[in-house]
Amino acid sequence: MAIHAEAFPVASLSGFDGILKEDVRFATGPGDSPGDAVNGWFDRLMLHSGIQTPPSVWLMLCLLAGVTTGGTIFVFSEHLLATAAGFIIGPVVPITIAMVKRSKRQTQIMEQLPGMAEALARVARTGRNIAYSFRAVAADTPSPLGDELRLVVRRTEMGMDLGNAVHDLTDRTGVTTLTMFSSAVGVHQDTGGDLIQVLERLATAVRDRLHFVNRLRAATVASRLGAMLMLIVPPLVVLFFTLSRENYIEDLVGSFWGRLSLGVAITLQIVGGLIVFRILRRSARF
């Protein structure tokens, strides 16, 4: 294995321990209130997606997307209800992009984890200590997992011990499987043990888990596509009738039963969408 010299510090200075990049977050409390829970979800989304843009800038991008979408619809149609819908739908686009990037990043990390664990076991088998082995593997591991490992290396260069440096790998990536890796490194750092055997078993377990997740996704692809169609088709139907009939929305909201039916439909659509996305998220969780 090629070892990169720039990954090895001359000495660790404990006096610089804790001097890290400022962590910008919107959530300020324990997450009990609905507002703080939403802020915490947005903070985790930005952190797990690996987007380097500050969360405040990404939030402004969401607002800009809503204003742009709603303004464009108003210029071409001068329809207030369609404009309001554009203001609501516009911010969903950047959020969706961040969610897709998070999913791809977590999948890549899971696929890289077995190889990284085996490489760490091979270097440790040569008689090197765990800190030296970790720095060697971190230097040669590609992104995105390599970025997280090199952040751990920089923390150790600033004086943190390796066990504490890897402790929040799961929080930074959203990949719960990394809990086993960070626990193994932390326990070895504190009490010792056969880390090589643990890492080899971890690599085998992760490969088995990836195989199971892939089989689960293949077996439930029809159900997941059906659920997505149930969420996409109703808005498309409403859009079709709105464009084909000039006063369709005005006639719908012009009566009490029409407004009641529209409100119930929107509420059920939102609740159903939240349930579907929660189920899909749990089934794809690593």
Image: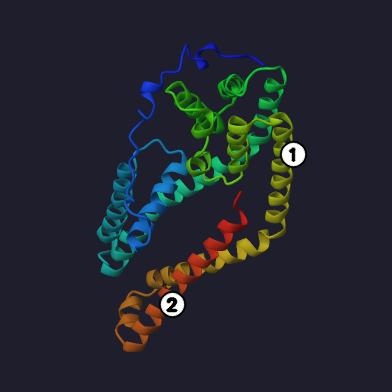
Image point (29%, 47%), residue name: 60
Total label count? 2
In depth, the one of 155 and 4 nearer the eye is: 155
Secondary structure under the numbered disc 1 in the rendered image:
helix
Report the residue that reaches farthest toward the front. Answer: 191
85 over 92 or under it: above or below: below
Location of residue 92 (image quadrant): bottom left
Res 195 seen here = yes
| Horizontal relation, residue 142 to residue 217: left or right | left
Quadrant of the frame with the N terminus: top right
In depth, the one of 109 and 224 nearer the eye is: 109
Q: Which of marks 2 and 1 is nearer the N terminus?
A: 1
Res 90 seen here = no
Location of residue 13 (image quadrant): top left
Q: Which mark is residue 176?
A: none
253 over 159 or under it: above or below: below
| Horizontal relation, residue 145 to residue 202: left or right | left
Q: Which amino acid does label 1 sit on?
A: Thr
In depth, the one of 263 and 286 nearer the eye is: 286
Q: Distance between the residues labelled 2 and 1?
A: 47 Å
Q: Name the residue under label 1.
A: 204
Return the x and y of residue 200 as percentages of the image width and height.
73, 33
Q: What residue type is labelled 2?
A: Ala
Foreground mark, 2 or 1, reads 1
Q: How crowded is mark 2: few (under 14 residues within 10 Å), some or many (20 or more)?
A: few
Location of residue 263 (image quadrant): bottom left
Return the x and y of residue 253 as percentages of the image width and height.
31, 81
**Label pair 2/1, CB-CB below 8 angstroms:** no
Return the x and y of residue 275 as percentages of the image width and height.
52, 67
| Horizontal relation, residue 242 to residue 68: left or right | right
Q: Name the residue under label 2.
A: 265
